[in-house]
Image (tube, rainbow, N blue to C red):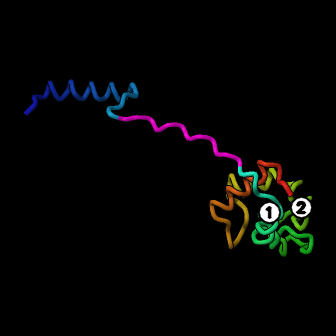
């Protein structure tokens, strides 16, 4: 059985190693490679269906008051491609980065959110 002095020295060595950031038998994970842009997505094959499924329940010019729009600001209408393109960075922030949109259900899954980000990053091709 080790004596108290040996345990104290061992404790100090381990504490010093931890303080210095030294780890034993540990390797840092390699940095993840940046994701490739998926520019195959466009309004026709992705964007229109996504917007219809998740956005138009609130962001439509057909709804005129705060309650029927569920709080969506007037002017943030996605009935047409131009309205989406105009608000692209805000859409990316709320749908992809913070997941604050859409409100209510159904909600897009992680892959759909990634696709929205990729579509916007590629310039929202039509």
Looking at the image, is 20 positioned above or below residue 87? above
- Residue 21 disc label: none
Q: Residue at x 15, y 25 (%)?
A: 6
Residue 51 placement, left or right of 15: right
The part of the chain drawn in magenta is 26-37
> Residue 51 at x, y = what percent?
80, 66
Does the residue at mark 2 contact the one at mark 1 (Cβ under 8 Å)?
yes
Mark 2 surroundings within 10 Å by alpha-carbon count, few (fewer than 14), some (14 through 19), many (20 or more):
some
Q: Which comes sooner in the sequence, label 2 or label 1?
A: 1
Q: Is residue 31 above or below residue 98?
A: above
Q: Is residue 39 above or below residue 45?
A: above
> Which of the numbered marks, if any, corresponds to residue 47?
1
| Residue 83 among magenta residues | no
- Give x and y (percent) for residue 102: 73, 65
Q: Residue furthest front?
A: 40
In front of the other: 4 or 47: 47
Residue at the image position 64 percent from the left and 64 percent from the top: 109
- The mark found on residue 81 in the picture is 2
């Amino acid at each position: 059985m080790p004596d108290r002095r040996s345990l104290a020295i061992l404790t100090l060595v381990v504490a010093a190693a931890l303080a210095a950031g030294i780890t034993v038998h540990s390797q840092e994970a390699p940095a993840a490679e940046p994701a490739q842009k998926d520019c195959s997505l466009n309004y026709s094959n992705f964007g229109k269906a996504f917007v219809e499924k998740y956005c138009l329940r609130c962001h439509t010019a057909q709804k005129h008051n705060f309650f029927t729009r569920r709080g969506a600001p007037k002017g943030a209408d996605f009935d047409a491609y131009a309205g989406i393109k105009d608000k692209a960075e805000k859409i990316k922030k709320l749908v992809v980065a913070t997941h604050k949109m859409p409100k209510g259900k159904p909600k897009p899954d992680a892959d759909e959110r990634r696709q929205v980000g990729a579509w916007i990053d590629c310039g929202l091709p039509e």
